[in-house]
Image: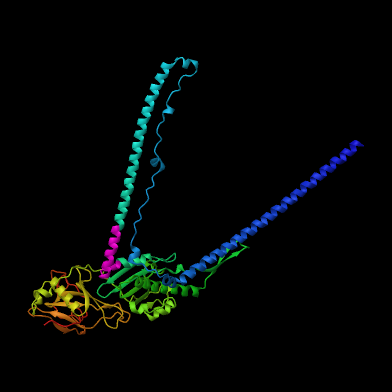
Amino acid sequence: MAVAGGSDEYARERARQARERERLRKAADAEAKRKAREEKAAYEAARAQEAVDRTSVAEHDVEQLAGLLRAAVLDGRPLSFDSLRQDFVPAVFAPSKSRTKPVPLPRWGEYEPEPPRGWLGALGFGRRSYDAEVEAARKRFDEALRDHAREEHKRVGKLDAAQARHDERNQQEAARIEEWNAGIEARRAACRDRDVEAVEWFVDQVLAASTYPHGFPKAHQVSYQADTGDLLVEIDLPLEDVIPAARAYRYVKTRDEITPVPRPEKERHELYASVLAQTALRTVHELFAADTDGVVRSVALNGHVATIDRATGREVHPCLITLQAGREEFGELVLTQVDPQACLKRLRSLISPNPYELEPVRPLVTFDLSKYRLMDSMDVVASLDSRPVLMDLSPTEFEHLVRQLFEAIGLDSVNTRPSQDEGCGRGGDEHRPGHAGFVHHPGQTHRQGGALRVGVRPGRCRGAQAGGQGHPGDDLVVRPGERGVRERPRTPRAPRRRQPRPPLQGTSRPRCHPGPGSSQAPALTSGCRQSSPMSSVPGPSLT
Protein backbone atom coordinates (compact mmCIF):
# COMPACT_ATOMS: atom_id res chain seq x y z
CA MET A 1 0.00 0.00 0.00
CA ALA A 2 2.82 2.41 0.82
CA VAL A 3 4.48 1.84 -2.56
CA ALA A 4 1.23 2.37 -4.42
CA GLY A 5 0.52 5.61 -2.52
CA GLY A 6 3.97 6.92 -3.23
CA SER A 7 3.57 6.30 -6.94
CA ASP A 8 0.31 8.27 -7.04
CA GLU A 9 1.84 11.22 -5.27
CA TYR A 10 4.80 11.24 -7.67
CA ALA A 11 2.47 11.18 -10.66
CA ARG A 12 0.43 13.99 -9.23
CA GLU A 13 3.59 16.06 -8.69
CA ARG A 14 4.69 15.42 -12.25
CA ALA A 15 1.29 16.49 -13.54
CA ARG A 16 1.33 19.63 -11.38
CA GLN A 17 4.75 20.60 -12.70
CA ALA A 18 3.62 20.02 -16.27
CA ARG A 19 0.59 22.22 -15.72
CA GLU A 20 2.82 24.89 -14.19
CA ARG A 21 5.19 24.80 -17.15
CA GLU A 22 2.28 25.09 -19.57
CA ARG A 23 0.87 28.02 -17.61
CA LEU A 24 4.23 29.78 -17.66
CA ARG A 25 4.61 29.16 -21.40
CA LYS A 26 1.20 30.57 -22.15
CA ALA A 27 1.93 33.55 -19.94
CA ALA A 28 5.24 34.14 -21.72
CA ASP A 29 3.56 33.90 -25.12
CA ALA A 30 0.90 36.33 -24.03
CA GLU A 31 3.54 38.73 -22.71
CA ALA A 32 5.53 38.48 -25.93
CA LYS A 33 2.43 39.20 -27.99
CA ARG A 34 1.58 42.13 -25.76
CA LYS A 35 5.09 43.56 -26.15
CA ALA A 36 4.95 43.02 -29.89
CA ARG A 37 1.64 44.89 -30.06
CA GLU A 38 3.04 47.71 -27.96
CA GLU A 39 6.21 47.93 -30.07
CA LYS A 40 4.19 47.93 -33.27
CA ALA A 41 1.88 50.62 -31.93
CA ALA A 42 4.87 52.66 -30.79
CA TYR A 43 6.53 52.25 -34.20
CA GLU A 44 3.38 53.27 -36.04
CA ALA A 45 2.93 56.24 -33.72
CA ALA A 46 6.54 57.30 -34.35
CA ARG A 47 6.10 57.02 -38.10
CA ALA A 48 2.84 58.95 -37.92
CA GLN A 49 4.58 61.62 -35.84
CA GLU A 50 7.38 61.73 -38.41
CA ALA A 51 4.80 62.45 -41.09
CA VAL A 52 3.31 65.17 -38.91
CA ASP A 53 6.75 66.68 -38.31
CA ARG A 54 7.57 66.69 -42.00
CA THR A 55 4.23 68.32 -42.69
CA SER A 56 5.00 70.96 -40.07
CA VAL A 57 8.37 71.65 -41.70
CA ALA A 58 6.75 72.07 -45.10
CA GLU A 59 4.11 74.39 -43.66
CA HIS A 60 6.79 76.39 -41.85
CA ASP A 61 8.80 76.73 -45.05
CA VAL A 62 5.75 77.96 -46.94
CA GLU A 63 4.94 80.37 -44.11
CA GLN A 64 8.48 81.77 -44.28
CA LEU A 65 8.29 82.14 -48.04
CA ALA A 66 4.92 83.85 -47.85
CA GLY A 67 6.23 86.34 -45.25
CA LEU A 68 9.63 87.23 -46.69
CA LEU A 69 8.78 90.90 -47.19
CA ARG A 70 6.70 91.40 -44.05
CA ALA A 71 9.33 89.83 -41.77
CA ALA A 72 12.07 92.09 -43.13
CA VAL A 73 9.96 95.24 -42.75
CA LEU A 74 8.81 94.41 -39.21
CA ASP A 75 12.35 93.58 -38.14
CA GLY A 76 13.22 97.27 -38.39
CA ARG A 77 16.96 96.80 -37.90
CA PRO A 78 18.65 97.71 -41.19
CA LEU A 79 22.39 97.43 -41.50
CA SER A 80 24.26 100.64 -40.69
CA PHE A 81 27.82 101.82 -40.37
CA ASP A 82 27.42 101.78 -36.59
CA SER A 83 26.50 98.10 -36.67
CA LEU A 84 29.60 97.43 -38.78
CA ARG A 85 31.85 98.86 -36.08
CA GLN A 86 33.56 96.43 -33.73
CA ASP A 87 34.15 96.74 -29.98
CA PHE A 88 37.39 95.58 -28.44
CA VAL A 89 36.98 93.20 -25.52
CA PRO A 90 40.39 92.15 -24.15
CA ALA A 91 40.82 88.43 -23.74
CA VAL A 92 41.37 87.17 -20.19
CA PHE A 93 44.75 85.63 -19.49
CA ALA A 94 44.12 82.08 -18.33
CA PRO A 95 47.34 80.04 -18.19
CA SER A 96 47.43 76.41 -17.17
CA LYS A 97 47.68 75.48 -13.51
CA SER A 98 51.12 73.97 -14.03
CA ARG A 99 52.40 77.47 -14.80
CA THR A 100 50.49 79.40 -12.17
CA LYS A 101 51.05 77.06 -9.22
CA PRO A 102 54.62 77.20 -7.85
CA VAL A 103 56.46 73.99 -7.09
CA PRO A 104 56.64 73.34 -3.28
CA LEU A 105 60.01 73.99 -1.65
CA PRO A 106 62.01 70.98 -0.47
CA ARG A 107 61.81 70.36 3.31
CA TRP A 108 64.75 69.37 5.44
CA GLY A 109 62.67 66.84 7.26
CA GLU A 110 62.49 64.79 4.05
CA TYR A 111 66.29 64.55 3.87
CA GLU A 112 67.38 64.53 7.59
CA PRO A 113 68.60 61.06 8.71
CA GLU A 114 67.22 59.45 11.82
CA PRO A 115 69.58 59.89 14.83
CA PRO A 116 70.71 56.83 16.82
CA ARG A 117 68.41 55.87 19.66
CA GLY A 118 68.52 53.72 22.70
CA TRP A 119 71.25 53.36 25.27
CA LEU A 120 73.90 53.10 22.53
CA GLY A 121 72.93 56.50 21.20
CA ALA A 122 72.93 57.89 24.73
CA LEU A 123 76.45 56.60 25.22
CA GLY A 124 77.56 58.24 21.93
CA PHE A 125 77.97 55.10 19.90
CA GLY A 126 77.24 55.64 16.11
CA ARG A 127 77.75 59.36 16.35
CA ARG A 128 80.37 59.44 13.63
CA SER A 129 78.26 57.58 11.07
CA TYR A 130 75.27 59.78 11.90
CA ASP A 131 77.28 62.94 11.27
CA ALA A 132 78.37 61.56 7.89
CA GLU A 133 74.75 60.81 6.98
CA VAL A 134 73.74 64.31 8.01
CA GLU A 135 76.46 65.82 5.85
CA ALA A 136 75.35 63.77 2.84
CA ALA A 137 71.70 64.62 3.46
CA ARG A 138 72.55 68.32 3.65
CA LYS A 139 74.30 68.12 0.28
CA ARG A 140 71.24 66.45 -1.25
CA PHE A 141 68.98 69.06 0.29
CA ASP A 142 71.10 71.90 -1.07
CA GLU A 143 71.02 70.31 -4.52
CA ALA A 144 67.23 70.00 -4.29
CA LEU A 145 66.99 73.67 -3.37
CA ARG A 146 69.07 74.62 -6.38
CA ASP A 147 66.96 72.41 -8.66
CA HIS A 148 63.83 73.97 -7.24
CA ALA A 149 65.18 77.45 -7.88
CA ARG A 150 66.01 76.54 -11.49
CA GLU A 151 62.58 75.00 -12.08
CA GLU A 152 60.86 77.95 -10.48
CA HIS A 153 62.88 80.32 -12.63
CA LYS A 154 61.84 78.40 -15.76
CA ARG A 155 58.19 78.38 -14.67
CA VAL A 156 58.17 82.10 -14.00
CA GLY A 157 59.93 82.73 -17.32
CA LYS A 158 57.38 80.67 -19.25
CA LEU A 159 54.55 82.40 -17.42
CA ASP A 160 55.97 85.84 -18.22
CA ALA A 161 56.46 84.83 -21.87
CA ALA A 162 52.87 83.58 -22.09
CA GLN A 163 51.67 86.80 -20.47
CA ALA A 164 53.68 88.84 -22.98
CA ARG A 165 52.28 86.85 -25.92
CA HIS A 166 48.79 87.29 -24.56
CA ASP A 167 49.27 91.04 -24.14
CA GLU A 168 50.71 91.25 -27.66
CA ARG A 169 47.71 89.44 -29.10
CA ASN A 170 45.40 91.81 -27.26
CA GLN A 171 47.33 94.78 -28.59
CA GLN A 172 47.23 93.42 -32.12
CA GLU A 173 43.50 92.77 -31.85
CA ALA A 174 42.96 96.26 -30.46
CA ALA A 175 45.00 97.75 -33.30
CA ARG A 176 43.08 95.69 -35.85
CA ILE A 177 39.72 96.77 -34.47
CA GLU A 178 40.88 100.38 -34.31
CA GLU A 179 42.01 100.19 -37.93
CA TRP A 180 38.75 98.53 -38.92
CA ASN A 181 36.67 101.20 -37.19
CA ALA A 182 38.80 103.93 -38.77
CA GLY A 183 38.16 102.34 -42.16
CA ILE A 184 34.43 102.22 -41.41
CA GLU A 185 34.42 105.90 -40.53
CA ALA A 186 36.42 106.70 -43.67
CA ARG A 187 33.94 104.75 -45.78
CA ARG A 188 31.05 106.48 -44.02
CA ALA A 189 32.52 109.88 -44.91
CA ALA A 190 33.22 108.71 -48.47
CA CYS A 191 29.65 107.45 -48.82
CA ARG A 192 28.31 110.83 -47.75
CA ASP A 193 30.50 112.35 -50.47
CA ARG A 194 29.01 109.87 -53.01
CA ASP A 195 32.26 108.00 -53.56
CA VAL A 196 31.45 105.16 -55.95
CA GLU A 197 33.71 102.55 -54.37
CA ALA A 198 32.49 103.33 -50.85
CA VAL A 199 28.82 103.26 -51.79
CA GLU A 200 29.17 99.98 -53.69
CA TRP A 201 31.09 98.46 -50.77
CA PHE A 202 28.34 99.42 -48.31
CA VAL A 203 25.65 98.06 -50.63
CA ASP A 204 27.59 94.79 -50.81
CA GLN A 205 27.58 94.63 -47.00
CA VAL A 206 23.82 95.29 -46.86
CA LEU A 207 23.03 92.55 -49.37
CA ALA A 208 25.40 90.07 -47.71
CA ALA A 209 23.85 90.70 -44.27
CA SER A 210 20.31 89.96 -45.47
CA THR A 211 19.20 86.52 -44.28
CA TYR A 212 16.93 84.32 -46.37
CA PRO A 213 15.66 80.75 -45.98
CA HIS A 214 17.71 77.82 -47.20
CA GLY A 215 18.00 77.61 -50.98
CA PHE A 216 18.32 81.34 -51.71
CA PRO A 217 21.53 82.33 -53.54
CA LYS A 218 23.62 85.26 -52.33
CA ALA A 219 25.34 86.27 -55.59
CA HIS A 220 24.87 89.92 -56.58
CA GLN A 221 26.46 92.79 -58.49
CA VAL A 222 26.11 96.53 -57.88
CA SER A 223 26.91 99.66 -59.87
CA TYR A 224 26.50 103.20 -58.55
CA GLN A 225 26.27 106.44 -60.54
CA ALA A 226 27.49 109.26 -58.31
CA ASP A 227 26.25 112.14 -60.47
CA THR A 228 22.65 110.93 -60.56
CA GLY A 229 22.46 108.87 -57.37
CA ASP A 230 21.18 105.87 -59.34
CA LEU A 231 22.04 102.41 -58.06
CA LEU A 232 21.87 99.32 -60.25
CA VAL A 233 21.64 96.00 -58.42
CA GLU A 234 21.63 92.57 -60.04
CA ILE A 235 20.75 89.69 -57.74
CA ASP A 236 20.34 85.97 -58.20
CA LEU A 237 16.86 84.70 -57.41
CA PRO A 238 16.02 81.20 -56.14
CA LEU A 239 14.95 78.48 -58.53
CA GLU A 240 11.51 76.93 -58.51
CA ASP A 241 12.65 74.06 -56.29
CA VAL A 242 12.66 76.45 -53.32
CA ILE A 243 8.88 75.88 -53.17
CA PRO A 244 8.09 72.67 -51.22
CA ALA A 245 6.68 70.15 -53.66
CA ALA A 246 4.56 68.48 -50.96
CA ARG A 247 1.71 70.16 -49.15
CA ALA A 248 1.65 67.49 -46.43
CA TYR A 249 2.88 63.97 -45.60
CA ARG A 250 0.81 60.94 -44.68
CA TYR A 251 1.79 57.65 -43.11
CA VAL A 252 0.31 54.54 -44.77
CA LYS A 253 0.30 51.64 -42.29
CA THR A 254 -0.40 48.93 -44.83
CA ARG A 255 2.74 49.77 -46.82
CA ASP A 256 4.72 51.15 -43.91
CA GLU A 257 5.78 54.25 -45.83
CA ILE A 258 5.35 58.01 -45.67
CA THR A 259 3.85 59.38 -48.87
CA PRO A 260 3.78 63.10 -49.77
CA VAL A 261 0.56 64.88 -50.63
CA PRO A 262 1.59 66.88 -53.72
CA ARG A 263 1.06 70.61 -53.74
CA PRO A 264 -1.19 71.72 -56.62
CA GLU A 265 0.75 73.06 -59.58
CA LYS A 266 -1.23 76.30 -59.62
CA GLU A 267 -0.41 76.93 -55.97
CA ARG A 268 3.29 76.31 -56.60
CA HIS A 269 3.34 78.72 -59.54
CA GLU A 270 1.54 81.44 -57.58
CA LEU A 271 3.80 81.03 -54.55
CA TYR A 272 6.96 81.12 -56.69
CA ALA A 273 5.84 84.32 -58.41
CA SER A 274 5.09 85.82 -54.98
CA VAL A 275 8.54 84.83 -53.71
CA LEU A 276 10.22 86.57 -56.65
CA ALA A 277 8.17 89.72 -56.15
CA GLN A 278 8.80 89.77 -52.39
CA THR A 279 12.54 89.27 -52.87
CA ALA A 280 12.73 92.23 -55.26
CA LEU A 281 10.72 94.54 -52.99
CA ARG A 282 12.62 93.39 -49.91
CA THR A 283 15.98 94.08 -51.54
CA VAL A 284 14.97 97.61 -52.52
CA HIS A 285 13.54 98.20 -49.03
CA GLU A 286 16.72 97.07 -47.30
CA LEU A 287 18.88 99.29 -49.53
CA PHE A 288 16.79 102.41 -48.93
CA ALA A 289 16.47 101.67 -45.20
CA ALA A 290 20.24 101.20 -44.77
CA ASP A 291 21.05 104.39 -46.70
CA THR A 292 20.29 106.92 -43.97
CA ASP A 293 22.30 109.66 -45.72
CA GLY A 294 20.20 109.54 -48.89
CA VAL A 295 23.05 109.06 -51.34
CA VAL A 296 20.93 106.57 -53.30
CA ARG A 297 18.10 108.40 -55.01
CA SER A 298 16.76 105.52 -57.07
CA VAL A 299 17.32 101.79 -57.34
CA ALA A 300 17.16 99.75 -60.51
CA LEU A 301 17.01 96.05 -59.73
CA ASN A 302 17.36 93.09 -62.07
CA GLY A 303 16.60 89.63 -60.71
CA HIS A 304 18.18 86.69 -62.55
CA VAL A 305 18.26 82.94 -62.01
CA ALA A 306 21.27 80.74 -62.70
CA THR A 307 20.09 77.50 -64.26
CA ILE A 308 20.50 75.11 -67.19
CA ASP A 309 18.57 75.58 -70.41
CA ARG A 310 16.58 72.38 -70.83
CA ALA A 311 16.64 72.74 -74.62
CA THR A 312 20.39 73.27 -75.08
CA GLY A 313 21.89 72.00 -71.84
CA ARG A 314 23.89 75.21 -71.50
CA GLU A 315 24.12 77.48 -68.48
CA VAL A 316 21.76 80.45 -68.77
CA HIS A 317 21.09 83.49 -66.60
CA PRO A 318 17.66 84.84 -67.62
CA CYS A 319 16.17 87.95 -66.04
CA LEU A 320 12.78 87.22 -64.48
CA ILE A 321 12.03 90.54 -62.81
CA THR A 322 13.26 94.11 -63.30
CA LEU A 323 12.13 97.33 -61.66
CA GLN A 324 13.04 100.96 -61.03
CA ALA A 325 11.95 102.86 -57.94
CA GLY A 326 12.76 106.30 -56.57
CA ARG A 327 13.31 106.90 -52.87
CA GLU A 328 10.27 109.13 -52.38
CA GLU A 329 7.99 106.93 -54.45
CA PHE A 330 9.08 103.77 -52.63
CA GLY A 331 8.84 105.43 -49.22
CA GLU A 332 5.12 105.98 -49.70
CA LEU A 333 4.45 102.23 -49.82
CA VAL A 334 3.15 100.36 -46.77
CA LEU A 335 5.00 97.15 -47.45
CA THR A 336 3.40 95.20 -44.61
CA GLN A 337 0.00 95.48 -46.28
CA VAL A 338 0.72 95.36 -50.00
CA ASP A 339 0.25 92.53 -52.43
CA PRO A 340 3.80 92.06 -53.78
CA GLN A 341 2.82 91.44 -57.39
CA ALA A 342 0.28 94.26 -57.47
CA CYS A 343 2.86 96.57 -55.88
CA LEU A 344 5.37 95.77 -58.59
CA LYS A 345 2.82 96.52 -61.28
CA ARG A 346 2.33 99.97 -59.73
CA LEU A 347 6.07 100.60 -59.89
CA ARG A 348 8.08 100.75 -63.11
CA SER A 349 8.71 97.05 -63.45
CA LEU A 350 8.61 94.12 -65.79
CA ILE A 351 7.76 90.66 -64.47
CA SER A 352 8.13 87.40 -66.30
CA PRO A 353 4.67 86.27 -67.42
CA ASN A 354 5.68 82.69 -66.70
CA PRO A 355 8.52 82.69 -64.16
CA TYR A 356 8.04 79.01 -63.33
CA GLU A 357 9.07 78.23 -66.91
CA LEU A 358 11.93 80.80 -66.71
CA GLU A 359 10.48 83.03 -69.43
CA PRO A 360 12.84 86.04 -69.44
CA VAL A 361 12.14 89.77 -69.65
CA ARG A 362 14.38 92.56 -70.91
CA PRO A 363 16.07 94.47 -68.04
CA LEU A 364 14.99 98.08 -67.72
CA VAL A 365 18.54 99.27 -67.01
CA THR A 366 21.92 97.69 -67.67
CA PHE A 367 25.42 99.10 -67.45
CA ASP A 368 27.47 96.91 -69.72
CA LEU A 369 30.81 98.59 -70.42
CA SER A 370 32.80 95.52 -69.49
CA LYS A 371 33.54 94.64 -73.10
CA TYR A 372 35.28 98.00 -73.64
CA ARG A 373 38.72 98.83 -72.27
CA LEU A 374 38.35 102.34 -70.91
CA MET A 375 41.14 104.92 -71.20
CA ASP A 376 41.80 108.13 -69.31
CA SER A 377 40.02 111.24 -70.59
CA MET A 378 41.79 114.14 -72.33
CA ASP A 379 40.73 117.80 -72.42
CA VAL A 380 41.12 118.67 -76.09
CA VAL A 381 38.78 121.67 -76.33
CA ALA A 382 40.88 123.71 -73.91
CA SER A 383 43.82 123.70 -76.34
CA LEU A 384 41.79 124.83 -79.39
CA ASP A 385 40.93 128.39 -80.45
CA SER A 386 37.52 129.59 -81.56
CA ARG A 387 38.01 128.11 -85.05
CA PRO A 388 39.63 124.71 -84.55
CA VAL A 389 41.20 122.97 -87.52
CA LEU A 390 39.88 119.52 -86.84
CA MET A 391 41.90 117.82 -89.57
CA ASP A 392 45.09 118.80 -87.74
CA LEU A 393 44.07 116.70 -84.74
CA SER A 394 45.36 113.21 -84.24
CA PRO A 395 42.78 110.40 -84.24
CA THR A 396 43.03 110.09 -80.44
CA GLU A 397 42.53 113.84 -79.91
CA PHE A 398 39.62 113.83 -82.34
CA GLU A 399 37.93 110.98 -80.46
CA HIS A 400 38.26 112.91 -77.20
CA LEU A 401 36.78 115.95 -78.90
CA VAL A 402 33.78 113.87 -79.98
CA ARG A 403 33.47 112.61 -76.41
CA GLN A 404 33.27 116.19 -75.17
CA LEU A 405 30.65 116.96 -77.81
CA PHE A 406 28.64 114.03 -76.55
CA GLU A 407 28.92 115.31 -72.99
CA ALA A 408 27.88 118.81 -74.14
CA ILE A 409 24.56 117.46 -75.46
CA GLY A 410 23.81 115.49 -72.32
CA LEU A 411 25.41 112.10 -72.94
CA ASP A 412 27.57 110.27 -70.42
CA SER A 413 30.50 109.44 -72.69
CA VAL A 414 33.73 107.47 -72.31
CA ASN A 415 36.71 106.77 -74.56
CA THR A 416 37.93 103.24 -75.15
CA ARG A 417 41.43 102.11 -75.88
CA PRO A 418 42.32 101.44 -79.53
CA SER A 419 41.53 97.81 -80.26
CA GLN A 420 39.49 95.60 -82.56
CA ASP A 421 36.48 95.48 -80.20
CA GLU A 422 33.76 96.42 -82.68
CA GLY A 423 35.73 99.45 -83.84
CA CYS A 424 34.33 101.60 -81.05
CA GLY A 425 36.26 104.66 -80.01
CA ARG A 426 33.57 106.24 -77.87
CA GLY A 427 30.38 105.34 -76.13
CA GLY A 428 27.58 107.46 -74.71
CA ASP A 429 24.73 106.76 -72.29
CA GLU A 430 21.83 109.18 -72.64
CA HIS A 431 19.11 109.98 -70.10
CA ARG A 432 16.05 110.69 -72.27
CA PRO A 433 12.86 112.26 -70.97
CA GLY A 434 9.96 109.84 -70.87
CA HIS A 435 12.20 106.79 -70.77
CA ALA A 436 12.80 104.64 -67.70
CA GLY A 437 16.37 103.91 -68.63
CA PHE A 438 19.33 104.89 -70.76
CA VAL A 439 20.38 104.78 -74.42
CA HIS A 440 23.85 103.48 -75.23
CA HIS A 441 25.61 104.89 -78.35
CA PRO A 442 28.77 103.03 -79.35
CA GLY A 443 30.63 105.08 -81.99
CA GLN A 444 33.63 104.84 -84.27
CA THR A 445 35.78 107.15 -86.38
CA HIS A 446 36.97 106.29 -89.87
CA ARG A 447 37.99 108.01 -93.11
CA GLN A 448 35.89 107.73 -96.23
CA GLY A 449 36.27 109.64 -99.48
CA GLY A 450 38.96 111.89 -98.05
CA ALA A 451 36.64 112.93 -95.23
CA LEU A 452 36.82 112.12 -91.54
CA ARG A 453 33.47 110.59 -90.63
CA VAL A 454 32.24 110.17 -87.06
CA GLY A 455 29.43 107.67 -86.88
CA VAL A 456 27.22 106.43 -84.09
CA ARG A 457 25.43 103.15 -84.46
CA PRO A 458 21.77 103.01 -83.44
CA GLY A 459 21.53 103.28 -79.68
CA ARG A 460 20.29 100.34 -77.67
CA CYS A 461 17.71 101.67 -75.26
CA ARG A 462 17.69 100.12 -71.83
CA GLY A 463 14.39 101.77 -70.91
CA ALA A 464 10.96 100.23 -70.70
CA GLN A 465 9.45 102.49 -73.36
CA ALA A 466 12.26 102.83 -75.86
CA GLY A 467 11.86 99.49 -77.58
CA GLY A 468 15.50 99.27 -78.56
CA GLN A 469 15.37 102.11 -81.16
CA GLY A 470 17.90 104.91 -81.58
CA HIS A 471 17.48 108.51 -82.72
CA PRO A 472 17.56 109.14 -86.45
CA GLY A 473 19.92 111.95 -87.34
CA ASP A 474 23.06 113.02 -89.21
CA ASP A 475 26.71 112.06 -89.45
CA LEU A 476 29.47 114.48 -88.57
CA VAL A 477 31.70 114.89 -91.64
CA VAL A 478 35.02 116.78 -91.92
CA ARG A 479 36.77 117.16 -95.27
CA PRO A 480 40.36 118.28 -95.81
CA GLY A 481 40.69 122.06 -96.12
CA GLU A 482 37.43 122.75 -94.32
CA ARG A 483 37.29 124.26 -90.86
CA GLY A 484 34.84 123.07 -88.27
CA VAL A 485 32.20 120.43 -88.68
CA ARG A 486 29.19 120.56 -90.93
CA GLU A 487 26.09 118.43 -90.80
CA ARG A 488 25.06 116.38 -93.76
CA PRO A 489 21.75 114.49 -93.68
CA ARG A 490 22.11 110.82 -94.14
CA THR A 491 19.52 109.75 -96.70
CA PRO A 492 19.12 106.18 -97.84
CA ARG A 493 20.04 105.51 -101.42
CA ALA A 494 18.78 102.82 -103.69
CA PRO A 495 21.36 100.14 -104.35
CA ARG A 496 23.17 100.40 -107.66
CA ARG A 497 23.89 97.60 -109.96
CA ARG A 498 27.54 97.45 -110.86
CA GLN A 499 28.96 95.36 -113.63
CA PRO A 500 31.63 93.01 -112.25
CA ARG A 501 35.09 93.87 -113.44
CA PRO A 502 37.68 91.25 -114.24
CA PRO A 503 40.56 91.12 -111.75
CA LEU A 504 43.83 92.73 -112.71
CA GLN A 505 46.30 90.41 -114.27
CA GLY A 506 49.05 89.36 -111.95
CA THR A 507 47.02 89.85 -108.80
CA SER A 508 44.18 87.99 -107.13
CA ARG A 509 43.08 90.78 -104.80
CA PRO A 510 39.46 91.81 -105.44
CA ARG A 511 38.34 95.39 -105.40
CA CYS A 512 36.16 96.57 -102.54
CA HIS A 513 33.18 98.72 -103.44
CA PRO A 514 31.05 100.73 -101.05
CA GLY A 515 27.86 99.00 -100.17
CA PRO A 516 24.34 100.32 -100.44
CA GLY A 517 23.76 103.52 -98.55
CA SER A 518 27.44 104.47 -98.26
CA SER A 519 29.01 107.63 -99.68
CA GLN A 520 30.85 107.63 -102.96
CA ALA A 521 34.30 106.88 -101.61
CA PRO A 522 37.06 105.62 -103.88
CA ALA A 523 37.31 101.85 -104.02
CA LEU A 524 40.16 100.25 -102.09
CA THR A 525 42.12 97.31 -103.36
CA SER A 526 43.50 95.87 -100.14
CA GLY A 527 42.94 95.90 -96.41
CA CYS A 528 39.39 97.30 -96.73
CA ARG A 529 36.66 96.58 -94.23
CA GLN A 530 32.96 97.20 -94.69
CA SER A 531 31.81 99.40 -91.81
CA SER A 532 28.41 98.87 -90.29
CA PRO A 533 25.64 101.42 -90.91
CA MET A 534 25.67 104.20 -88.38
CA SER A 535 23.06 106.58 -87.13
CA SER A 536 23.78 110.15 -86.27
CA VAL A 537 25.04 112.12 -83.34
CA PRO A 538 22.29 114.53 -82.33
CA GLY A 539 23.56 117.94 -81.34
CA PRO A 540 24.81 121.30 -82.59
CA SER A 541 27.50 121.60 -85.22
CA LEU A 542 30.75 123.49 -84.83
CA THR A 543 31.37 126.33 -87.19
Which quadrant of the view contains residue 498? bottom left
**Number of on-image labels:** 0
Quarter of the figure with the C terminus = bottom left
- Give the extent of the magenta segment: 178-200
Helix, strand or loop: magenta stretch:
helix
Along the viewing direction, whichever of 487 and 87 lies nearer the viewer: 87
One can see residue 94 in this view:
yes
Q: Is residue 98 magenta?
A: no
Along the viewing direction, whichever of 503 and 148 lies nearer the viewer: 148
Which quadrant of the view contains residue 33? bottom right
Does residue 342 appear to the left or right of 249 in the view shown? left
Instruction: Residue 27: give x, y in percent of width and height.
Output: 74, 51
Quarter of the figure with the N terminus = top right
**What residue sits 35% from the left and 79% below the top?**
329
Instruction: Residue 205: give x, y in percent of width and height.
Output: 34, 65
Instruction: Residue 62: give x, y in percent of width and height.
Output: 49, 70
**What residue sits 24% from the left and 82% below the top?**
471
Instruction: Residue 12: give x, y in percent of width and height.
Output: 85, 43
One can see residue 512 in this view:
no
Along the viewing direction, whichever of 156 and 22 lies nearer the viewer: 156
Above or below: residue 255 compared with residue 117: below
From this viewpoint, which residue is outermost toward the front? Answer: 122
